[in-house]
Image (spheres, rainbow, N blue to C red):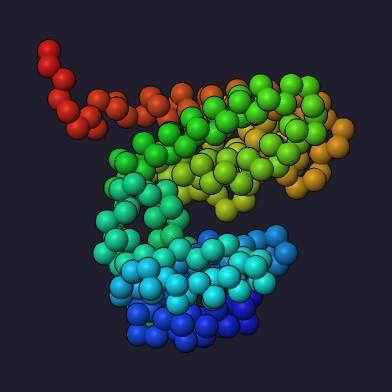
Amino acid sequence: METKLAELVSRLKEAAGKNLESVVLYGSGASGKYRPGSSDLNVLCTLVAMDLGELQLLAPVVRWWTHEEKEPTPLFFLTEELQRSTDVFAIESLDLKRAHRVLFGKDPVAGLEIPMNLHRVQVERDLRLLLLRLRQHALLAGKNEMEYVAVLKKSDSSALTLLRHTLLAFGEEPPPGADGLFERIAAITGTDASAFQMVHEVHEGRIVDKDLFAVYDRYIHALEKVITALDGMVPKKEWQRVTKEG
């Protein structure tokens, strides 16, 4: 991991020159949860200027990183742009701030201010989107069991992230492990911890003898309970930008 990151930084510096302001590692690579072969190396860079010509200079580095090293495309921001984006990327900004490591330059993340009221709105929005997508997949998959397996495996990481942020929205520090997270979510929202646990086991390849249709159904209902609990947390009318008459 460190060799790959050092090579990335070297190539970025060579391509961007003085326009490269900082390179930041975030996610599992920065939190100590990186697993070679299954985890991604997520990188964010800030630039002094962000015009097309500057991006084209960086394109060969990004192509090498994504095609040869099989890593996600780095994110590129202006520092001020990053600071002004925390209201619309509250979940992402909070994750970035909680787990990051500066690989080059100054730290553009430490001073980010996350509006937690908007964070709570985004958490509910993304949970509702996840629920809608699960229902849509069921409509498309019918009784094709393998389709359900694929959807459960794909949705597990999103669900884990959103459940962590649900606890943060309730003012709690999430437990480090998945089992503890599911138990705490169940304690706060009244949902079924085992429903999330079974989905996580499907993702990890540990379930082979369960009724996957039942697992999927319990998963959907467990998400519904989490959403209902979060929805009742704070009156949404307090955040309306336009005051209604009457």
Looking at the rendered image, the quarter that the C terminus falls into is top left
Depth order, front residue of 231/47: 47
* Outermost residue, right side: 209
Q: Residue at x 43, y 34 (%)?
A: 125
Depth order, front residue of 106/52: 52
Q: Residue at x 47, y 86 (%)?
A: 14
In the image, 32: left or right of 100?
right
* Outermost residue, left side: 245
Q: Where is residue 9 in the image (x, y as percent from the top left)?
A: 51, 81
Q: Residue at x 80, y 45 (%)?
A: 205
Q: What is the total number of numbered labels drawn onto the structure image?
A: 0
Looking at the rendered image, the quarter that the N terminus falls into is bottom right
Q: Residue at x 26, y 64 (%)?
A: 80
Res 224 quadrant in image: top right
Q: Where is residue 150 in the image (x, y as percent from the top left)?
A: 73, 39
Q: Answer above or below: position of 181 versus 176.
A: above
Taking the image as drawn, is residue 140 in sight? yes
In the image, 14: left or right of 197?
left
Taking the image as drawn, is residue 100 in sight? no
Q: Position of residue 138 (x, y in %)?
A: 67, 24
* Outermost residue, top side: 246
Q: Where is residue 64 in the image (x, y as percent from the top left)?
A: 61, 74
Q: Answer above or below: position of 157 versus 66.
A: above
